[in-house]
Amino acid sequence: MKSKYLFSIIVLLSSLPALAKQHHNHQDKNEWQTIPVASQMEIIDPSGQSKTITPSCAFETVPNPLDGTPLDNSFQFYFKQGKSKNVLVYFNGGGSCWNDATCVASLALEAVEGDRPTYNPSILQENSPVDAGGVFDDSNRRNPFKDWSKVFIPYCTGDLHAGSSEVVYTDVDGSITGFPGAPVPVKHKGFDNFLAVQDWMKTHFKGRSWHKNAIDKMLVTGSSAGGYGATLNFPYLQAAFPRAKAMLFADASASIVSEGFVDDVFRSGSPWNFENTLPTIFRSGLGTYTAADLNVDLFQRLSYRYPRSRFAQYTTEFDGVQVLFNKVMDQIDQGNTNPFTWALQPSDYLYFADWNARMTASFGQIADTTRNYQYYIGEGSIHTILTDDFATEAQPHPFYDEQSAQGVRFTSWLNYFVNARWFYPISLAYEAQ
């Protein structure tokens, strides 16, 4: 941010009201409700038409890690009722997959090396808000959202919460099925899952006693792949609750991708069926998006279409997971489909430098060309900030520990973004050494 505004920033942030008075009750894990979802539903889609959706995860079952027996992998989501009329809608992260290499071959990483595949196909693993910490820790007095209702949308489809298709990929070398060339059907139903959650939300909130203004503020947010899900589905949630003061915060999802990825995914006929799932403001760009401008394009479209809404992004300067995915995409573009060669190496410093330069430029360009967007770039390489999923010893609770951008606490910055009556964009970044 320009130095002449620094004094104004500090004054604004230091004058924020107290987040909340401390209370001593520990978070009751039983407050979270698990909401089951039918495998087939009839809903009214965003265009007002009747639509059949089939919510599901990538696979109907997943193997029990103890004995290999199949476990039910049906989609479900979580809800916690808050004390206020504000709602936080959170899209969980978990990678992505869009071809044979990422959707099938990468699964061997976990089986052989115990490492993460490029996406999480399981509803049972890393898909719960219980003990996630951060924004879900309602016992922390510094949590700006401790009194908000919360909707937690798990992610098990590899499609950035925006797909509606079933694609048969190929187990090229047989590493997963034991049969080279075997077909592997993968359900990219993230958009169906989102529509099921949104349909439930419309019934739940509009059916309450204060239904004429069921939601005051609504923060649409998510981490990693969930940040993209929040971004791509924001227009639908805004349309579903037009009276709500809707805001979008994308955590660790800077859209720094390869040209091959954009050509494969952001086009008509993509494996995720984006031409039938994306909101109109994004769908109109299919076939014209470029890797160089994807992040700028997405947020400019949102900013111009919703001038009264607020938009923000967060990342660290060298986010290791985002850099890894940038490498994976680049390696695939070069024809390398062997997932065992994709891990980041000490020699990959150019990937970090390239990612940082492109991320910084895109955040800056959005801030310079819009009036309702701001960013926070922290130092280091930690991935995501809203939960403790990627916490380190140095930062055991990133949501509350982060203050590396000009000494401003992230929670204060986000609290201002959400609650300031008159919004003045405050973009902050670490000071490069």
Image (cartoon, rainbow, N blue to C red):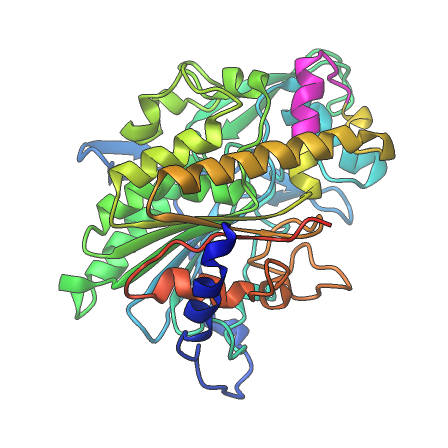
Which quadrant of the view contains residue 329?
Answer: top right
x, y percentage for residue 67?
A: 77, 46
13 horizontally vs 285: left or right: right
248 horizontally vs 154: left or right: left
Q: Residue furthest left?
A: 212
Q: How many discs mark residues in the rendered view? A: 0
Residue 33 in sight: no
Q: Residue furthest front?
A: 4
Check the image and report above or below for 224 versus 423.
above
**Which residue is at 13% across, 63% downward?**
212
Check the image and report above or below for 377 versus 171.
below
Residue placed most toward the observer, 11 or 83 = 11
Q: Residue furthest bottom?
A: 24
Check the image and report above or below for 218 versus 95.
below
x, y percentage for residue 287?
A: 41, 14
Residue placed most toward the observer, 169 or 322 = 322
Q: Main secondary structure of the magenta part?
A: helix
Residue 297 in sight: yes
Residue placed most toward the observer, 372 or 281 = 372
Which quadrant of the view contains residue 176?
Answer: top right
Residue placed most toward the observer, 72 or 432 = 432
x, y percentage for residue 53?
A: 34, 34
**Which residue is at 49% across, 72% downward?**
143
The question of residue 44 being in magenta is answered with no
Q: Which residues are magenta?
A: 326-338
96 horizontally vs 421: left or right: right
**Which residue is at 44% across, 55% downward?**
426
Which quadrant of the view contains residue 351?
Answer: top right
x, y percentage for residue 213?
A: 17, 63
The question of residue 329 being in magenta is answered with yes
